[in-house]
Amino acid sequence: MKETVRNLKKVYSISNEYRKYFILILITSIIQMIIGIILPLYTAKQIVLFSENIYEELFLTSIMVLGISLINDINYFIMGIVCRKFRMGTIKNLQMKLGEEILKIEEKEIQKNGMGTFIERITQDTEHMAEMFTHGTGYISKTLMNAGIFIAIFTINKYVFLFYFISAILLTSLYLLRTNKMGKLDFIYRNQREKVSSLVGELVRGEKDLKMLSAKNSFLNQLFFEIKEKIKKDYDKRMVDILYLMIVRILTELFVFGLVILLIFLIKTQTLSISLAVALFTYKTNIMTNFMDNISLLLDEIKTFNVSTNRVFGIIENKDFDKEQFGDRHLKQVTGNFEFKNVSFSYENYKVLNHMSFKINSGETVAFVGRSGSGKTTIFNLLGKLYEISEGQILIDGIDIHTLDEESIRGNITMISQNPYIFNMSIRDNFKLIKENIQDKEIIKALKLSCLYDFVKNLPCGLDTILGEGGTNLSGGQRQRLAIARALVQKTKIILFDEATSALDNETQRDIQTAIDNLKGKYTILIIAHRLSTIKNSDRILLVEKGKIVGIGTHQELLKTNLSYKKLYESEITNQ
Ligand code: ADP
């Protein structure tokens, strides 16, 4: 109960402009409650008047019943509307808030948990929560109506009331036990469902690689295993449900039998007339079936609401996942120089950077080279503050990035990964994501500088071409050039470029080279180079080995002074 009230308060706090509907839900519920109590009382009075042949009063009472029933219908109608409005508004607010909060979660948590976890919470859990305000309120009003019937029975005969009351308490306790047990099993089931969603997400995103790696079967085996586990958890849950329901049904039948015996006894001892006994007997469906059904459905709804609310607010209130932390210092425009000072970093327990130090000057074009796995991409990730360093300092314009706000870091750095994500919208809209009011002129200029304009110009729909999810309609080289164009529009001072490892054809390679050359001098450019031939013109080259910088200089200098670099270069030449 406490948990439900706490969770309702949380939902209320996020409902913002829809709060008025919440208040209206409360008001209509109270009206419903009052009607729920007085209507059965009048109905009971009708039965008594019938049995005592007092027709005039019966006529007036019937008019009252009709009037109250009509008010009840109108109230129910209004309640239905406000509940739905509140439901829709709450889902909207929750999903938007979750979207916002998910983007604040630390990268390591996203990697660890998989996207399915978050997709489930944003789509399924918010819907489950909101159902409390449609189905849930429906069950509450019906339960209240049935509670009113209790009072009516009380006014007719106290013994029958006592019998009904005891049977209702016993049946409700059983339902409570069931709900408690089901709540725990449901939590386990939903976590398993999240795992399946994560895998399905990977199946869709990685379908091409799965096909080409001939890994379809082994992936599907893994997926089937998780699906089987999910079904098992679902089965466990449903078994508990079936078992409890069977006990409830048997008990209900025994109670009905007991009720018949009690009524016969009361008629025999002339405590009750036959017509009242028949009327009281007809209440059995309301008390033992409808009342219990509604309570059980309501309890189920509350349980689902609580599980989902805890999962959703686990994200919003930073309980389940670590969120990114930023300082509050703001730098509008950085000059573009930065420094790694004795930086160490580990992914979980695996040390990747080991007391790394280097300095980059504004406007420089610097290339990082080194064997795969030496830590080059990690340098980029740390500079973008996607991960937290464990030791040392990263300084932008001499200021520790820990003290800077998000905008000062990410608003001044663009990262072009090997396979940049292009959104499934038109080329123009991909630019509008960065700059809402961008004009075509500016887009075209950026596309020209990134050597992509000739390609776009010849597309039948030009800038209106839809690029497919992840930019699937573009080649790897085109995606990178489009990302360069985005960087040009973003006008960040620092550009991090992770050269594609896959062999690009010479022309594409040349285009990318030209695109980067177009940026030289105006920006600080860092390139992770997988082919030394492409970065001979860099101002400086930093050689990375096992998480340390082991050589700094121009291509010629390093060839002369650094044996590791020389070996790397020679191995590349022999591999060509
Ligand atoms: P490079 O770019 O030089 O190839 P990276 O910086 O990508 O190297 O990776 C350095 C090391 O860190 C590698 O051994 C890699 O396996 C590991 N690594 C990279 N990303 C992660 C991650 N998200 N979680 C755990 N380990 C990682």
Image (cartoon, rainbow, N blue to C red):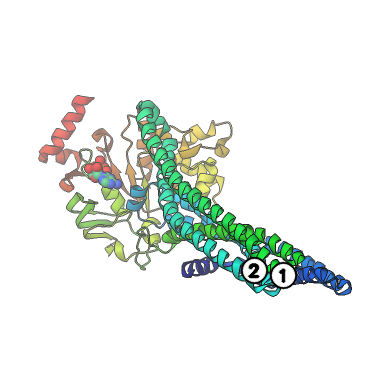
For residue 80, say whether it is visible. Answer: yes
Q: Could you tell me which residue is drawn at 27 percent across and 63 percent down?
A: 398
Amino acid type assigned to the residue bearing label 2 in the image:
Val
Secondary element at image label 2:
helix
On screen, residue 495 versus residue 571, left or right, reads: right
Using the rendered view, name the quadrant where residue 255 is placed: bottom right
Instruction: Write down the residue under mark 1.
Output: 272
Mark 1 residue element: loop
The image shows residue 208 at horizontal and vertical percentages of 41, 30
Query: Horizontal and vertical percent for residue 114?
Result: 38, 46
Foreground disc of the pair 1, 2: 1
Q: Residue 160 carries which label?
A: 2
- Choose between 503 and 69: the one closer to the eye: 69
The vertical placement of 203 against 416, above or below, is above
Query: Which of the four quarters of the rendered structure image does ligand 1 lie in?
Result: top left
**Apparent side of residue 10 relative to residue 163 in the rendered image (left or right):** left
Q: Quarter of the image holding residue 520?
A: top left
Do tag 1 and tag 2 residues touch (Cβ < 8 Å)? yes
Q: Which residue is drawn at 70% across and 72% down?
A: 271
Q: Where residue 566 is drawn, which disc sits there?
A: none
Residue 382: give x, y in percent of width and height: 29, 53
Report if residue 367 is visible in the image: no
Task: Identify whether 136 is placed above or below 428.
Answer: below
Q: Which of 410 and 162 is in front in this view?
A: 162
User: What is the quadrant of the C terminus in the image?
Assistant: top left
Q: Residue at x 46, y 60 (%)?
A: 177
Counting residues from the start of the chain, the first of labels 1 and 2 encountered is 2
Amino acid type, label 1: Leu
| Percent of width and height locating residue 446 | 47, 44
